[in-house]
């Protein structure tokens, strides 16, 4: 801890005393600020009062431990807060009514899971990852993490350790899962951002993007885990604060899902050694990204060390040589050991921890977030066997303490007790925040009036060829092949539907399908949903659309899906701003509503608040309201899955789902600088009926190819399907009551384009019924995309030309 945090030079040999008892409010705030503790004044006063009741001052290690445990990253205190929500201004949004939440997370996200009460949800919101059933022997565990602030400061290391950390979440789930697939979703600022708009010391978005992609690539590839699903999104709101989501799916034995800790178990640290890297990582994530924060808070990753640790851990799991396990992530030993010993108590001897180099103070050893470390609770009788196994595999395993029965966290260094905290105070003593959340649509939209990417005011969407080409070149839609090709998605041999497929292996897919057990045809589907552009208008609608998109992508590739669940990752701006919080409440309510409508339980999640950054003009910016929904489901037979690429000429093209004149918040509205019309709407009841019928049609092999309609609408979806088959598509529109550009570019959710063989026309139409099923065209030998309305050709473009535009836009990333 920096000496500036103390008001006294009094020291013990190993711990520094922090004088709080006589500190005024301003002094308490200074100690928190200069120590990068990110504790509020109320929290500092609570700590002050607690130690006054003990008639002593805290040590540096005690204060640091409390700050880590109470950090937003670890304690989720915004979601846990007592939150008063009221609606000040509504402009067409769905009213929720004024509400008082005692715990927003429990009353929205977790409530949906509780109400659905699915028996195949085997572990939810209680471990490092959520767990759902797979077969009689094994289950699936899934977790998605964020590593935003570290990636803004040091993109390569920040993103790499983000992936390494979520892999360890799988290793630390139950008694340990085997990682079988990675996902990644990135949100960057525009790659053509002018350098003079950036604050001194801020990295350019292109440098951030290249570093992030490289970091995830190197870590995942070296671990031998396929990276098979993801997305890359661009918006000016992420210029100074990128979002980096990393996820991992694991396979875990059904009898290894539960874990316990018993008094007398040994505290064993395994894997990497401890250094100064990553200190204050947990608490710094609650601070805005401003000048003066150094990259020393970013961890240093070592994928080969983690691979070795993973391999030997899974051997130890199979031998049941330990009783519990967790990873050293945010907060290092403080978090891992403090959480494992929460219900028992624990005593640690810090001088026994293996170090990268000498000279670390006890609080630095305790709080370091050095990577590739795990903590085990090992019964004493198993220690020699475990120690021998790890030594044989050249991975360090060291006893550094013992779990007790006194409900205390006792931290020693050599012959001195440097910290002693009651577990009850540490884990339950954080004062509940009292927050005001206000929805004011005018203020909300004013915050993001300059969001998005550069507009082209001269572009007229009635010029269909020019508009389609602009959409295909748009960074959100353009091919991400330059990123995808850096990842190994074939390692482990289970990949079925890959990120890119088609006759030239370069067309986009809607979701990933893989077989975690090569002896079975049973598979797993993973997809995601993300729509920050709608979040700028109404986060409630954004959340519903994100859930719908994630589920819709699964429907597009899957036959009979079972055990389908979702994860949430809320990334928000200024959590102290009541208007930002108003949007958060609306997003949480929207996510709950969609989850209940589709019967999709949340099984895990992670929030990231305080995503703010200061621009060159000194203005503090919040990122756009962002909710990533990740979905996972079991596919009974992967031989029934469907890809998006067209399969041949002279087949029929159907549009499934109702298209409405909803252009507001769409990409075509963004590139044409027009925001007239309505925001999208979702009819969950109709969507559920449609989705079930699509699954039934796929079950009977009536659909040759399927692609969901999302960014860019029908026209972009049609082009992408044609990219996969290198055949053409002719679309004919009857009069609809609105112009063709609305039909082609509307982003109304819950819609699909499907290809059906002529001989299956009657069977398909009977299976689907009459609910929003329109025969709109056919595939052609001529490799062009043609749009015809009332015998007038509105667009006729060669597929090769459109594909070149789509593929070349982000080629340099």
Image: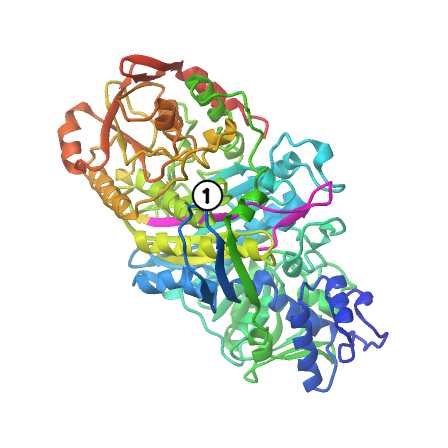
Image coordinates of residue 427 in percent, x first then y, are 56, 74
Q: Nearer the viewer, residue 442 or 804?
A: 442
* 602 inside magenta stretch: no
Q: Nearer the viewer, residue 175 or 633?
A: 633
Q: Work out whether 755 lies above or below 769.
A: above
Q: Is residue 55 left or right of residue 117?
A: right
Q: Residue furthest right?
A: 9
Image coordinates of residue 626 in percent, x first then y, are 51, 47
The segment highlighted magenta reads 609-633
Residue 174 shows in this picture? no
| Residue designated by label 1 | 530
Quadrant in which the N terminus is drawn: bottom right
Q: Work out whether 39 lies above or below 311.
A: below
Type of colouring: rainbow
**Point 56% across, 64% down: residue:** 435
Quadrant in which the C terminus is drawn: top right
Q: Residues within 10 Å of mark 1 (few under 14, many from 20)?
A: many
Residue 234 shows in this picture? yes
**Point 47% across, 25% down: residue:** 472
Image coordinates of residue 452 in percent, x first then y, are 55, 36
Q: Work out whether 694 lies above or below 50.
A: above
Q: Work out whether 315 lies above or below 60.
A: above
Q: Nearer the viewer, residue 261 or 470?
A: 470
**Point 36% across, 19% down: residue:** 726
Image coordinates of residue 114 in percent, x first then y, are 35, 65
**Point 53% across, 71% down: residue:** 340
Image-quadrant location for residue 781: top left
* 625 inside magenta stretch: yes
Q: Is residue 809 left or right of residue 206?
A: left
- Report the number of numbered marks: 1
Identify the secondary structure beneath mark 1: loop
């Amino acid at each position: 801890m920096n000496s500036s945090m103390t008001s006294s030079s009094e020291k013990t040999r190993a711990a520094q005393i922090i004088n709080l008892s006589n500190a005024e409010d301003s002094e308490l705030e200074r100690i928190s600020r200069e120590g990068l503790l990110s504790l509020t004044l109320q929290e500092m006063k609570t700590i002050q009062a607690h130690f006054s009741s003990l008639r002593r001052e805290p040590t540096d290690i005690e204060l640091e431990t409390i700050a880590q445990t109470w950090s937003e990253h670890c304690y989720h205190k915004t979601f846990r807060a007592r939150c008063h929500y009221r609606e000040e201004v509504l402009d067409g949004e769905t009213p929720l009514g004024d509400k008082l939440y005692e715990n927003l997370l429990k009353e929205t996200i977790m409530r949906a899971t509780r109400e659905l009460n699915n028996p195949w949800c085997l572990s939810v919101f209680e471990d490092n990852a959520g767990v759902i059933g797979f077969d009689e022997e094994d289950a699936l565990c899934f977790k998605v993490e964020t590593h935003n602030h570290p990636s803004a400061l040091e993109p390569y290391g920040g993103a790499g350790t983000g992936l390494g950390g979520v892999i360890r979440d799988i290793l630390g789930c139950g008694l340990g899962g085997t990682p079988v697939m990675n996902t990644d979703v990135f949100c960057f600022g525009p790659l053509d951002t002018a350098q003079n708009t950036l604050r001194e010391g801020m990295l350019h978005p292109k440098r951030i993007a290249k570093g992030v992609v490289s970091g995830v690539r190197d870590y995942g590839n070296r671990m031998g885990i396929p990276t098979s699903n993801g997305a890359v999104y661009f918006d000016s709101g992420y210029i100074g604060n990128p979002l980096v989501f990393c996820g991992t799916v694991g396979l875990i034995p059904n009898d290894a899902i539960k874990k316990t800790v018993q008094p007398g178990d040994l505290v064993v640290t395994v894997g990497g050694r401890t250094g100064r890297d990553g200190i204050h990582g947990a608490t710094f994530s609650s601070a805005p990204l401003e000048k003066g924060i150094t990259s020393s808070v970013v961890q240093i990753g070592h994928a080969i060390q983690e691979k070795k640790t993973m391999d030997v851990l899974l051997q130890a799991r199979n031998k049941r040589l330990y009783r519990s396990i967790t990873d050293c992530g945010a907060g290092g030993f403080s978090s891992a050991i403090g959480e494992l010993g929460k219900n028992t108590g624990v005593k640690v001897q810090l001088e026994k921890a293996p170090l990268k180099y000498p000279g670390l103070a006890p609080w630095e050893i305790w709080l370091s977030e050095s990577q590739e470390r795990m903590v085990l609770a090992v019964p004493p009788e198993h220690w020699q066997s475990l120690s021998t196994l790890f030594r044989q595999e050249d991975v360090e395993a060291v006893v550094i303490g013992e779990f007790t029965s006194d409900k205390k966290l006792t931290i020693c260094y050599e012959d001195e007790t440097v910290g002693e905290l009651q577990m009850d105070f540490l884990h339950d003593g954080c004062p509940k925040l009292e927050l005001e959340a206000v929805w004011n649509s005018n203020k909300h939209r004013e915050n993001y009036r300059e969001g998005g990417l550069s507009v082209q005011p001269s572009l007229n969407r009635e010029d269909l060829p020019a508009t389609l080409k602009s959409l295909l070149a748009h960074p959100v839609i353009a091919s991400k092949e330059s990123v995808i090709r850096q990842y190994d998605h074939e390692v482990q041999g289970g990949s079925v539907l890959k990120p890119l497929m088609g006759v030239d292996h370069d067309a986009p897919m809607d979701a990933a399908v893989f077989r975690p057990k090569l002896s079975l045809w049973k598979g797993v589907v993973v997809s995601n949903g993300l729509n920050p552009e709608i979040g700028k208008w109404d986060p409630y609608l954004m959340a519903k659309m994100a859930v719908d998109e994630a589920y819709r992508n699964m429907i597009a590739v899957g036959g009979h899906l079972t055990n389908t669940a979702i994860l949430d990752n809320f990334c928000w701006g200024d959590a102290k701003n009541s208007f930002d919080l108003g949007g958060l409440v609306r997003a949480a309510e929207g996510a709950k509503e969609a989850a209940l409508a589709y019967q999709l339980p949340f099984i895990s999640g992670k929030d990231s608040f305080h995503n703010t950054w200061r621009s060159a003009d000194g203005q503090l910016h919040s990122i756009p309201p962002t909710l990533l929904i990740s979905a996972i489901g079991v596919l009974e037979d992967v031989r029934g899955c469907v890809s998006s690429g067209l399969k041949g000429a002279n087949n029929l093209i159907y549009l499934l789902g109702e298209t409405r004149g909803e252009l507001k918040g769409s990409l075509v509205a963004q590139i044409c600088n027009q925001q007239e019309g309505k925001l999208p709407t979702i009819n969950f009841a109709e969507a559920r009926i449609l989705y079930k019928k699509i699954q039934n049609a796929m079950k009977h092999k009536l659909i040759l190819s399927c692609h969901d309609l999302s960014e860019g609408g029908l026209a972009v979806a049609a082009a992408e399907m044609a990219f996969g088959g290198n055949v053409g598509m002719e679309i004919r529109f009857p009069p609809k009551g609105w112009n063709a550009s609305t039909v082609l570019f509307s982003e109304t959710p819950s819609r699909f384009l499907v290809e059906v063989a002529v001989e299956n026309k009657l069977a398909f139409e009977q299976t689907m019924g009459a609910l929003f099923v329109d025969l709109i065209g056919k595939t052609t030998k001529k490799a062009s995309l043609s749009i015809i309305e009332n015998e007038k050709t509105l667009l006729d473009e060669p597929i090769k030309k459109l594909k070149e535009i789509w593929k070349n836009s982000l080629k340099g990333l």
